Amino acid sequence: MKIAQILSASALCLSLVACSQAPENKDAVIENKINALLNQMTLEEKLGQMNQISASANIEEMTVLIKKGEIGSILNEVEPRRINALQRVAMEESRLGIPLLFARDVIHGFKTIFPIPLGQAATFNPQVVKDGARVAAIEASAAGIRWTFAPMIDVSRDPRWGRIAESCGEDTYLNTVMGVAMIEGFQGDSLNSPNSIAACPKHFVGYGAAEGGVDYNSTYIPERRLRNVYLPPFEAAAKAGAATFMSSFNDNDGIPATGNSFILRDVLRGEWGFDGFVVSDWASTGEMLAHGFAADTKEVAMKAVNAGVDMEMVAYTYFKELPGLVKEGKVKEETIDEAVRDILRIKFRLGLFDNPYVEDNTAKMFYAPSHLEAAKQAAVESAILLKNQGEVLPLDASVKSVAVVGPMADAPYEQLGTWVFDGEKSHTVTPLAAIRDLVGNKVQVIYEPGLAYSRDKNKAGIAKAVAAASRADVVLAFVGEEAILSGEAHCLADLNLQGAQCELIAALAKTGKPLVTVVMAGRPLTIANEAELSDAVLYSFHPGTMGGPALADLLWGKAVPSGKTPVTFPKMVGQIPIYYAHNSTGRPAKHNEVLLNDIPLEAGQTSLGCTSYYLDAGFYPLYPFGYGLSYTTFKYSNVELSAKELKVGDVLTVTCDLENTGKRPGTEVVQLYVQDKVGSVTRPVKELKRFARISLKPGEKKKVSFDLPISDLAFWNIDMKKVVEPGDFSLWVAPDSQSGEETPFKVVR
Ligand code: NOJ
């Protein structure tokens, strides 16, 4: 692949800005058709378009509502025959024949399940992520689904929060790049194509900052932080032509997102020019009652629609309350018309008026070989090698027997991860199956799970696993979390391995056999102790349908790990929130901290080193953001800048030599970080600005080059203006957020 192609994901963003659905590209023909329809619609028919229901088992019940024009969209109906039957009622038996829009949470695959989004982010490969979304769109649309509630691009800095699994991790830029890649994959070249599905960036906005990592909790994100950290992925999504947005559950500084006209109207429509529609999250309109933000459903409907929520997911308050509110003048009919216009616009763009029915293509599309291959590649690239002491990996021909142990070694359902409604475990290939397949009779595979599932506390099986380990040359321990332990409403206060898994690893380590620990989880777990006890650690998050073959290939060196951590791995839960792009404090850590056991007895009151760290955990995380090893080694040298002084309109070109200094081919994710040294407000110590995946043969050297427009250094400053503030900057070209040599440059007026 040419360097130019892989260089910067920002090129991807730029090309997407020009994509056909860009807001300013309203199609006059469509707008005329919308107006013609609107002129014929009764208020009830308009409110029907704004109403989304969850499919009921009773098709007759839905038929009655559709005939009356009371429904605009249905979620969770995935049976093509039923979809066509319902659509026929809308097209032929409702007064105006407006098609329904069928939606589903297609988060990381429909049938063929890809790694969870956090794992996809670990690939640092937008192309792989885009391919995954394309496969998901092809499979989902084959069943009649034309709208997914994805990508989830909530910047997520708290692994206690179960939904971190669905996100692209802690970094604003990584979420931006991956979110755009997913939108491009879901929506294809044109929304109009029958295998494109409308994307829905969510959750707008700030949901990932739930206090204490507890789902649905309040957030307190001041406007500057909102704009600098949480909004950019959504802005890029809007500009990439995302068809819809979803308002989030959380209240930020006291205002539920579903009732927040600042974000839904001023920012999303006003500043970014979004012309698709906004759907509430599931009943998040009605939940404004529980928030104490509205006294009754009438106030709910008024606040949500006036704030800019066009479609209500499963709450029915619009349909019930808006007629009265319009009559009383508390909601203008133009507000309703605008909402309906936005919804119809997307239905027209999807081509639903012309092609409302699905041709049942499921048999051909589901689990197609090319889909499985793409899922395997994504799983390969999402795995992160965290440790490889003594180069125990990859396994070679000298390994004649392996003990495969642990509750995740053969757990076809669990490795699929969270938010899987349609993928079937019968199609999953587990590590155990894939290892047996790969090694055939050349290697003896001794399988002894030790524990039945990740939360299993029954230690009775551990002795058997230890016995198996003692008979083997190498121990492969597959541990982690069941799928249900992450995802919505599945937050944890303790991030250690569940059940008796820590005891299992400790017992295996005592055998003295080389111990390779593979973790399959929905979040970074606190595995400091297990990593210490293991010779190698491969972290795969939940890798999906093809996780087994991907891991088997990685373990035996048919593939080389290239994933990098998309989120900081804490040593212990008490370090959370811990993320690399924190602001500069007045007393930064000096990295030679006095720790708990260094303090003498009856020490006098002192502030020790007077710097910012924990006495018991120090300053550093277990693994920093952007970290990951390979089976080879890379040397970075000759970082050069096209200029040391640049103006705001300039483009800085940063080059660096990257050499494969090991004995195997490998791919490195080269990362470019920048720090704005002095600002009108304090600035992050580092921010990821670019990355590139570079593949090198042993001994090969390449020049890596990044183009960074200085305008990309703009931030929302003390005056709440987005500007580049001239002054001193530093950059690092590095293998992770914690390393690299600092190189200064200046921005001048
Ligand atoms: C609630 C979740 O927060 C959201 O992400 C999802 O898309 C909807 N439910 C629909 O299932």
Image: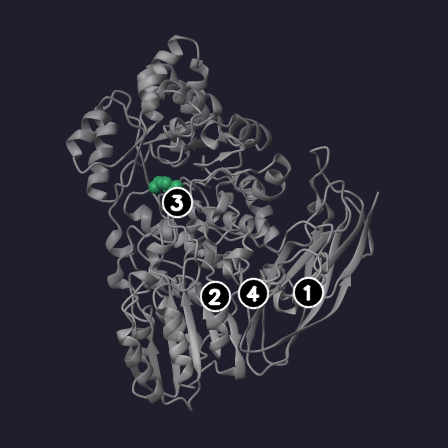
Farthest residue toward the top?
328
Residue denoted by label 1: 593
Q: Position of residue 316 (x, y in %)?
A: 31, 25
Whether residue 41 is visible: no
Q: Which mark is residue 196?
A: 3
Q: Earlier in the sequence, mark 2 or mark 1?
A: 2
Distance of mark 1 from mark 3, alpha carbons? Answer: 54 Å
Dot 3: what SS? loop
How dense is the environment of label 3, judged by Cα within 10 Å: few (below 14), some, or many (20 and up)?
Answer: many
User: Is the C-beta separation of discs 1 and 4 under 8 Å?
Assistant: no
Q: Earlier in the sequence, mark 1 or mark 4?
A: 1
**Residue at 30% across / 59% down in the picture?**
367
Residue denoted by label 2: 381
Q: At label 2, which amino acid type do we have?
A: Glu
The quarter of the picture where residue 547 lies is bottom left
Q: At label 3, which amino acid type do we have?
A: Ser
Q: Which mark is residue 230?
A: none
Distance of mark 3 from mark 4, alpha carbons? Answer: 38 Å
How dense is the environment of label 4, judged by Cα within 10 Å: few (below 14), some, or many (20 and up)?
Answer: many
Pair 3/4: label in front: 4
The quarter of the picture where residue 575 lies is bottom right
Above or below 676: residue 495: below
Dot 2: what SS? helix
Q: At label 1, which amino acid type do we have?
A: Glu
Residue denoted by label 4: 623
Mark 1 residue CB less than 8 A from any atom of ligand 1: no
Pair 4/2: label in front: 4
Pair 1/3: label in front: 1
Above or below 39: residue 436: below
How dense is the environment of label 1, judged by Cα within 10 Å: few (below 14), some, or many (20 and up)?
Answer: some
